[in-house]
Amino acid sequence: MVDGRRWAMKTLIGSMDGKGPAEALYAVAELHKDLARTETEAVLRARQAGLSWEAIAVCLGVSKQAVHKKYGKR
């Protein structure tokens, strides 16, 4: 799964060749929004599956407090 996402990222970056800097930034902003939605969904699924906030935090590379603050009320 990670390799597929890296490929998608490289494809997106490659598709920016020849585009202006503003267009490239818009594309990055859209990708960021998509990744944020994907992260939210993954966290919700992980909680439904019984993962602790600590386990989720480790996977995301953040503190338990940070992940709980961001997603704890959903």
Image (cartoon, rainbow, N blue to C red):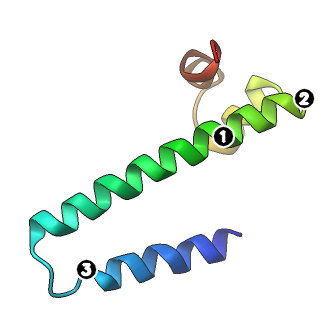
Q: Is residue 54 left or right of residue 37?
A: right
Whether residue 51 is visible, yes or no, is no
Q: Quadrant of residue 16?
A: bottom left
Circles 2 and 1 in contact, beta carbons < 8 Å = no
> Circle 3 sits on which residue?
16
Q: Is residue 65 left or right of residue 58?
A: left
Label 2, label 3: how many angstroms apart (C-alpha)?
40 Å
| Dot 2 or dot 3, earlier in sequence | 3
| Dot 1 or dot 3, earlier in sequence | 3
10 Å neighbourhood of mark 2: few (<14), some, or many (≥20)?
Answer: few
SS label for mark 2: loop
Q: Going 33% across and 85% down the picture, which residue do you hit?
A: 14
Q: Residue furthest top?
A: 73
Q: Position of residue 25 (x, y in %)?
A: 20, 60
> Circle 2 sits on which residue?
50
Q: Quadrant of residue 39?
A: top right
10 Å neighbourhood of mark 3: few (<14), some, or many (≥20)?
Answer: some
| Dot 2 or dot 1, earlier in sequence | 1
Q: Position of residue 5 (x, y in %)?
A: 58, 70
Whether residue 41 is visible, yes or no, is yes
SS label for mark 1: helix
Q: Going 85% across and 30% down the picture, which residue do you hit?
A: 48
Q: Of tags 2 and 1, which is closer to the observer?
A: 1
Q: Amino acid at mark 3?
A: Met
> Circle 1 sits on which residue?
41
Q: Residue furthest right?
A: 50
